[in-house]
Amino acid sequence: MAGRYIRKFTKWLFLSLNILFCIIFLLSCLSLYVNPNRWAAIGFLSLTVPYIAVLLFFFIIFWLILKPRLALLPLITLLIGWKQLTVIAAWHPSHTFNNTKADTTLRIITWNVRGMYGISNSFYTQQRNRQEIAKLVNNLDADVVCMQEFNNSTYPNDPNANNIGLFIKDHPHYFFARDFSNRNGKYFAGTILFSKYPILDTGKTRFVGPEAESIIYADILKGKDTIRIFTTHLQSFEFSKEDYADIEKIKDPNVETIEASENLYSKMKTAFLLRGKQTETIRKLTDLSPYPSVICGDFNDVPNSYTYFRIRGQRQDAFLSSSFGIGRSYNALAPTLRIDYILPDDHFHITQFDMVDEGLSDHHLLVTDLSLKK
């Protein structure tokens, strides 16, 4: 008799959990349509999609073994959110990247270079890393190079002295956002775009926010074709070393976590709200492009977010089109953080794509070859 009640209790417990996770998953699917600037909670929910999807998959297996009819509950839930599932991972296991570039293609790199310092605090290592960053980029023979968190200084003893000079031999044309400056105008930071080909026109739109950056574009002339390249760096969570320490505290149930949680929540909520506004700015600008266009950069948001779906629209995702796996592009916090993107519009064929991680930044370098459809 006791065993019967235990089985009944267990069944209802798992069913209740299954229903709860289904509700969370379906709410997270609203991130396709709901701007976090209107409802900040949707930003947090979008981060849970890969994990809830895995749990629902295991519920399907669980119910198929114990009570097959109930497997329909998680199965139908996942089918409703199918669009969310399609952006989590790419499925091209045989993909390779050929360093030799065809003349007819346009090779684009995007990379958050973390100030060109690398991940070391040593002055000498920083000097070496900036050379290694430039070497890696130049060896890939890219036509267009977009970098976020790029710094340039005219002080000779600064680790960032003449960073622009490391790239202009192979990419003589460039446009620098110069979002931040100090030292009487001898130091600048922000997003930059380098090009092998002539730049016909450029534009810059500053985002809203206390530490906001910009979206910039450059019209590249390749042969007889004009191509508009957008690149940007959206609002980050701006976690400090103390914040990462707070994350570790939250993982430890023996440590007081309320204050740490509130601080992290506040920073994340602010970032979601600002990215919501920045996303609308980006979409308006990209929709107005008179030329075939590509937008790339560090969006600081996952593929299940409003940011990603709104900016992407009907565009292609170079990673999803020709890569394999979940495509983690940021080396901290979680193994599912794909927050850097290259999104060409439908005027292009995506020939190949790769991610490169040489330990020179907390972000991976993204590179793709595109060809214009004729």
Image (tube, rainbow, N blue to C red):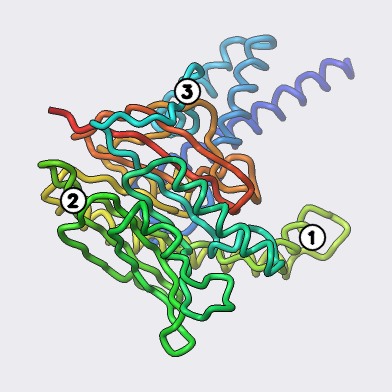
Q: Residue 118: x and y, percent?
A: 61, 58
Q: Residue 195: x and y, percent?
A: 30, 53
Which residue is located at x 22 percent, y 65 percent?
203
Q: Which residue is mark 3?
A: 96
- Determine the secondary structure under disc 2: helix
- Determine the secondary structure under disc 1: helix
State the image quarter where residue 372 is shown: top left
- Could you give the CA–CA distance between mark 2 and mark 1, rounded to whole angstroms? 44 Å
Circle 3 residues within 10 Å: few <14, some 14–19, many ≥20: few
- Determine the secondary structure under disc 3: loop
Residue type pointed to by label 1: Lys
> Do the residues bearing badges 1 and 3 touch, measured as CB atoms within 8 Å?
no
Viewer-nearest residue: 351 or 61? 351
Quadrant occupied by the N terminus? top right
Which mark lies nearer to you, 1 or 3? 3
Which residue is located at x 25 percent, y 58 percent?
217
Which residue is located at x 28 percent, y 54 percent?
230
Which residue is located at x 35 percent, y 72 percent?
208
Residue 258's label in the rendered image is none
Res 29 visible: yes
Q: Earlier in the sequence, mark 3 or mark 2?
A: 3
Viewer-nearest residue: 166 or 244? 166
Residue 287's label in the rendered image is 2
Quadrant occupied by the C terminus? top left
Position of residue 76 relative to residue 318, above or below, is: above
Residue type pointed to by label 2: Asp
Q: Which residue is mark 1?
A: 249
Res 81 visible: no
Residue found at the far front of this picture = 169
Which mark lies nearer to you, 2 or 1? 2
Q: Earlier in the sequence, mark 2 or mark 1?
A: 1
